[in-house]
Amino acid sequence: MKLQFTTVDVFTDRQFGGNPLAVVTNAQGLSTERMQSIAAEFNLAETTFVLPPKDPAHTAEVRIFTPKAEMPFAGHPNVGTAFVLARAGESYGRPVSGDRLVFEEKAGLVRMELTREGGVVVATRLAAPQPLKIGEQVSPEIVAAACGLAVGQIESGAHRPVIASCGVGFVFAEVKSRAVLAAATHHGDVFAKHLPMERAVGIHLYVPVHENGIDIQTRMFAPLFGVPEDPATGGANVALIGLLAHLRSESDVTLDKAIGQGFDMGRPSILQASAEKKAGKVVATYIGGRCMPMMSGIIDLD
């Protein structure tokens, strides 16, 4: 069985930046176990597998795997997969055209918008498949221990660390400064004890900044999922923009932020995040960015 794959760098305008993604474009017939093995072989933050859609009105079914687990939804895999399919112009013999795609995923339908320059797709943006959900708080002591920080370096003025989701849950915690964010690390034993996989994917730290057009810098640690640190996490940042809109005092607001991630890993990523709040409720969240093609090839399976 020969599988075709393409890799792209997501949330960047240059090669060797952003978050690498592998897209297997003809995954029909693969078992879940084989998909997981292939994702572990690529050993990227995520690998996607494109299948024919169950509903012919949609573009494709997309399954997403980290090296250790399947994800019901994630950001950079959708942005990169939409980029790959749009550039290819077809999927399973069906044309991929226009500026809107719809993916079937375990978390629901993910709607994508394409941006073209000179007729060529250069960026994509997704609408989160689920509305913002704010869950339980997590003690600053747990977040600090998991991320190698002092409790006093966690900022609790706007909110205490909290689990939030737009399709997949993360712990969100603001830190005191950019230097604190840069000093953070991860301790897998703390994650295993206090933040098992069924509770949250990982911890997403953030701090407001004013640097080179970036409004927020972030880092995300998910060691239990085989992602010690992620260069760009669309699923986390799309929930972060929703959380920030939720915390605003206005009943109606549109919030747009440029979010940086991966800078402390040498994989700088820039994500464009937006949220809409109406009558005191966050009604829509979006995340998008540019992509760069990298490699393509064949997986030759026995």
Image (cartoon, rainbow, N blue to C red):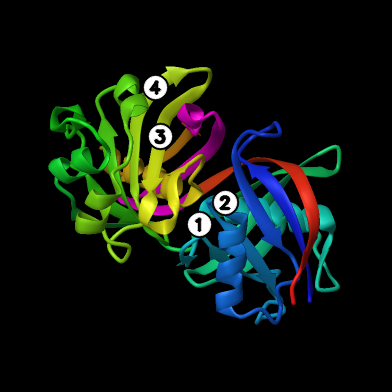
Disc with the residue nearer the chain's start (1 vs 3): 1
Q: Which mark is residue 209?
A: 4
Instruction: Give how far apart the Cα atoms at labels 2 and 3 are.
Output: 19 Å
Q: Which residues are magenta?
A: 261-285
| Vertical order, 25 against 1 (above or below) | above
Name the front one of labels 4 and 2: 2
The reply to whether dot 4 and dot 3 touch (C-beta < 8 Å) is: no
Disc with the residue nearer the chain's start (4 vs 2): 2
Residue to which mark 3 is pinned:
218
Q: Which mark is residue 285?
A: none
Q: Amino acid at mark 4?
A: Val
Q: Amino acid at mark 2?
A: Leu
Q: Residues within 10 Å of mark 3 (few under 14, many from 20)?
A: many
Residue to which mark 1 is pinned:
74
Q: Nearer the viewer, residue 263 or 146?
A: 146
Q: Secondary structure at mark 4?
A: strand
Name the front one of labels 1 and 2: 2
Q: Nearer the viewer, residue 193 or 249?
A: 193
| Vertical order, 144 against 6 (above or below) | above
The reply to whether dot 4 and dot 2 touch (C-beta < 8 Å) is: no
Q: Which mark is residue 44?
A: 2
Horizontal and vertical percent for residue 294?
Answer: 75, 43
Horizontal and vertical percent for residue 145?
Answer: 19, 40
